[in-house]
Image (cartoon, grey):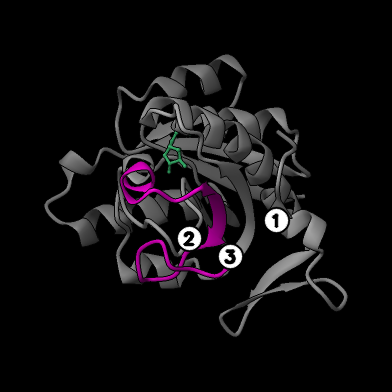
């Protein structure tokens, strides 16, 4: 069984979905860069080890990332799942965990990288929005895509209602993607996502829920 860690900064609902999915691996720790992250108590209550690597205790981004990487390696973490981890990671960190570092982003990348994605979707008037699970590469929110889920943007949507519709899909596709990687059915090779066998299984790589 592969050992994995989940990195959070806040409420940790994606982390909860990953733990509850009973993935074929061992979650060796939930690590937060913020001691006050609500998700830490939830994980501890489930008997999952928790750690805090507080970014405010380090003089630079590089020093924080080095401490974080050392903690992950001390725990024997082979796969790193970013779940609402609100820190931009340095190129050194990303390269150290290349092919073993996955993120969930609340938009259909490459549309709307960065923050406030639901506001951006409403402001631009797109009719379809969603979320993306991808391997992390040094450029922010740009890595090779594993799974996406699409949701409609409705006339009455606010950023809150749209966020909730997207979040429900995040909680489905993140465990699916993590499972595929843990089982070795999906991996990063030469900068591309490769699925076992020949073609990407379309039913898995794009989820369009019935409305
Ligand atoms: C999610 O929308 C995730 O896609 C984004 O940050 C949010 C974190 O929510 N990266 P949670 O902490 O998983 O509840």
Badge 3 vs badge 2, beta-carbon distance below 8 Å: yes
Residue at the left extreme?
A: 59
- Name the quadrant of the C terminus: top right
Beta carbon of the mark 1 residue lies under 8 A of ligand 1: no
- The residue that label 1 is drawn on is 206
Tag in front: 1 or 3: 1
Q: Residues within 10 Å of mark 2 (few under 14, many from 20)?
A: many
Start-end of magenta stretch: 120-144
Say what secondary structure mark 1 lies in: strand
Q: Earlier in the sequence, mark 3 or mark 2?
A: 2
Say what secondary structure mark 3 lies in: strand
* Residue 210 on image: x %, y %: 75, 37
Rendered position, 131 above or below 111 = above
Tag in front: 3 or 2: 2
- The residue that label 3 is drawn on is 145
Q: Which mark is residue 109?
A: 2
Label 3 to label 2: alpha-carbon separation: 8 Å
The answer to which of 115 and 120 lies nearer the viewer is 120
Q: Earlier in the sequence, mark 1 or mark 3?
A: 3
- Looking at the image, which residue is at 48% across and 68% down? 143
Residue 173, image quadrant: top right
Rendered position, 48 above or below 134 = above
Q: Earlier in the sequence, mark 1 or mark 2?
A: 2
């Amino acid at each position: 069984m592969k050992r994995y860690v989940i990195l959070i900064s806040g409420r940790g609902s994606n982390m909860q979905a990953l733990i509850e999915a009973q993935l074929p691996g061992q979650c060796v720790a939930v690590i937060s860069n913020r001691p006050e992250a609500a998700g830490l108590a939830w994980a501890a209550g489930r008997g999952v080890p928790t750690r805090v690597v507080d970014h405010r205790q380090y003089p630079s981004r590089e020093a924080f990332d080095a401490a974080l990487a050392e903690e992950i390696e001390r725990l024997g973490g082979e796969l790193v799942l970013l779940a609402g981890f609100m820190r931009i990671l340095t190129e050194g960190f990303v390269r150290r965990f290349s092919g073993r570092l996955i993120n969930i982003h609340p938009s259909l990348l490459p549309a709307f990288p960065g923050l406030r994605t639901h506001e951006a979707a409403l402001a631009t008037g797109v009719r379809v929005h969603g979320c993306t699970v991808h391997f992390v590469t040094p450029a922010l929110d740009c890595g090779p895509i594993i799974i996406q889920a699409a949701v409609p943007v409705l006339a009455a949507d606010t950023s809150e209602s749209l966020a909730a519709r997207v979040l429900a899909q995040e909680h489905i596709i993140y465990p699916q993607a993590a499972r595929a990687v843990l089982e070795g059915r999906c991996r990063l090779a030469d900068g591309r996502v490769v699925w076992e066998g020949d073609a990407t299984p379309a039913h898995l790589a794009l989820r369009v829920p019935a409305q």
